[in-house]
Amino acid sequence: MASAPEKRTPMTTATTSTTSGLFSDGPRFLRLALRADAIVTGANGLLYLALAAPLKDLLGLDTTTGRELGAFLVVYAVAVWAISMSAHPKRLAVTAVVEANALWTILSITTAIVGWFSLTTAGTVWTLLQAIVVAAFGTLQYTALRRTR
């Protein structure tokens, strides 16, 4: 005689509670959002510094501007990382990061539309992709900051 198939319970409880725990813990979520921003921004800055000459042809961004942009991004990334090191990052500092990310997003989109630099098609696409990533970081940081109240 065949027995009825075993009823299986999905094993999503642990994953869900861990994920929801991360997002419900405001300070932890905020530190993670800041650190992710710092890592991606720092890596981007280092690439601009190291590859400014080859990126000139690919993106249409002159070498000097690429290096200056890279240096700025590395310094910014270090500052964001420093803010993230506190158990409870200062609201004013995080607000400044969120606002800087909003400004970067607006300026990136404006650059792509207006053509402030003589970017190639790849450069324009890259600029818009960066705007999306930076807007996402800013949104995550803003959301996390609201949860720390």
Image: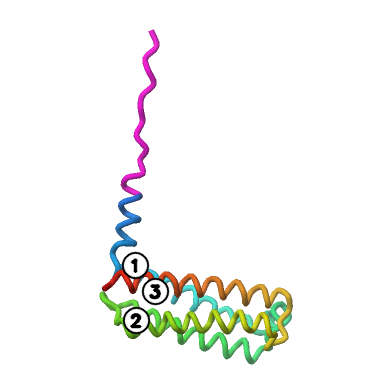
- Mark 2 and mark 1 residues within 8 Å of each other at the beta carbon: no
| Mark 3 crowd level (few <14, some 14–19, many ≥20, 10 Å Cα) | some
Identify which residue is drawn at 26% across, 76% down.
88
Label 1: element kind: helix
Tell me the CA gap for discs 2 and 3.
Answer: 14 Å
Q: Amino acid at mark 3?
A: Tyr
Whichever of callouts 1 and 3 sits on the residue coming sooner in the sequence is 1
Label 1 to label 3: alpha-carbon separation? 11 Å
At horizontal 73% and vertical 79% (from top left) the residue drawn is 120
Q: Residue at x 38, y 79 (%)?
A: 81
Say what secondary structure mark 3 lies in: helix
In the image: residue 62, left or right of residue 49: right
Quadrant for the C terminus in the image: bottom left
Viewport quadrant of the N terminus: top left
Q: Which portion, as a residue range, is magenta?
A: 1-15
Whether 92 is drawn above or below 23: the answer is below
Q: Is residue 77 above or below residue 10?
A: below
**Residue occupied by mark 1:** 29
> Mark 2 or 1 closer to N-term?
1
Q: Is residue 6 magenta?
A: yes
The one nearer the camera, 71 or 18, is 18
Amino acid type indicated by mark 1: Phe
Q: Secondary structure at mark 2?
A: helix
User: How much space separates mark 2 and mark 1, taking CA atoms?
Assistant: 13 Å
Q: Earlier in the sequence, mark 2 or mark 3?
A: 2
Report x, y in % for residue 94. Answer: 36, 81
Near mark 1 (Cα within 10 A), the count class, few <14, some 14-19 or many ≥20, is many
User: Which residue in the protein does label 3 denote?
Assistant: 142
Look at discs 1 and 3 and give the one toward the viewer. Answer: 3
Q: Amino acid at mark 2?
A: Ile
Residue 82 visible in the snapshot: no
Residue with the mark numbered 2 = 83
